[in-house]
Amino acid sequence: MGLTFATFNVNGIRARLTLLSRWLKEKRPVDVLLMQEIKCRNDAFPHRDFEAMGYTCAVNGEKGFNGVAICAKAPLTNVITHFDAPTLDRQKRLVQAQINKTTVICCYAPRGAKTGEKKAFKAAFYRELTDYITQTLPRKPALLLGGDLNVALTESDVYDPALFQGEVGFLPEERAALRSLLQTGLHDCWHRHHRPDIAPFTWWDYRTAAIWRNEGMRLDYLLASDTLCENLEEIAVDLWPRRRKTPTPSDHAPVVATFKEAA
């Protein structure tokens, strides 16, 4: 029996706990859940609520900002929250754990900016992450990196390419950085399983009711090594959590993939 992985930018774990509980219990009882923007310290994370649903969680959090977590029904081992890289360790944006033979990395990439320090920080984050994967993949051939990467890779990943020209998340240098990450040996699971010119969106602006017009971007990815991609069975964006009026949704929707064999 295979494993089902999901990545979900929850935009505040405490605000989204009721929604997550309903989704995991009633809709998608995934085996492994990667969450970004949990926005809480480790000691404020709702471990007991996830334990009640059968999950153990590895958390790398900070108060009010950023923060990531991996929650799994299988044991988590070799948890890493410090990566010996100045930009990767500057904020709480990465957590890594071993699940059976699979190395899982949850990532929340910086949003960036058109100019200035935030743009430089995002570029440095991608360089250090690419270096880290380059070093790690030969030792961990079954590797999955999932998260909000804050880049729309192709023109199919935005609802109006002309409108997004020159905008953060679609800048040429940001897209080149994500392509460099993919050149390490990771594969975009969506493109491996579907036509690359047909992409689902994973983020829609709260302010404009964009979800109902499907005016979005694909910012959330599951990237997998060859070993895992060979066993990719299906991948989809689950719109149920995003289309709720109550409980209040995140501005992202989860990406869910099933691999027919656990590596």
Image (tube, helix red, strand yellow):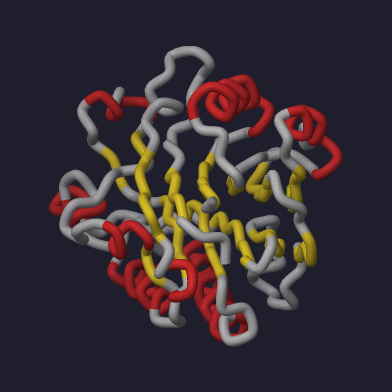
Q: Quadrant of residue 255?
A: top left
Q: Is residue 63 visible?
A: no
Mark yes or no: residue 262 visible: yes
Seen in the picture, residue 190 relative to 201 is either above or below; the reply is: below
- At x 44%, y 37%, the residue is 252
Give the quadrant of residue 135. Answer: bottom right
Q: Residue at x 76, y 56 (%)?
A: 76
Residue found at the far right of this picture:
43
Residue furthest toward the top? 246
Q: Residue at x 86, y 40 (%)?
A: 43
Which is more toward the observer, 73 or 103? 73
Above or below: residue 103 compared with residue 219? below
How far from the left and from the top, in percent, is residue 158?
24, 49
Answer with left or right where residue 222 lies relative to residue 43. Answer: left
Task: Please tell me which residue lies in front, 247 or 72.
Answer: 72
Residue farthest to the left, as pictured: 162
Which quadrant: the C terminus? bottom right
Q: Position of residue 115 (x, y in %)?
A: 41, 64
Which percent across, then down, holds residue 124?
Answer: 54, 74
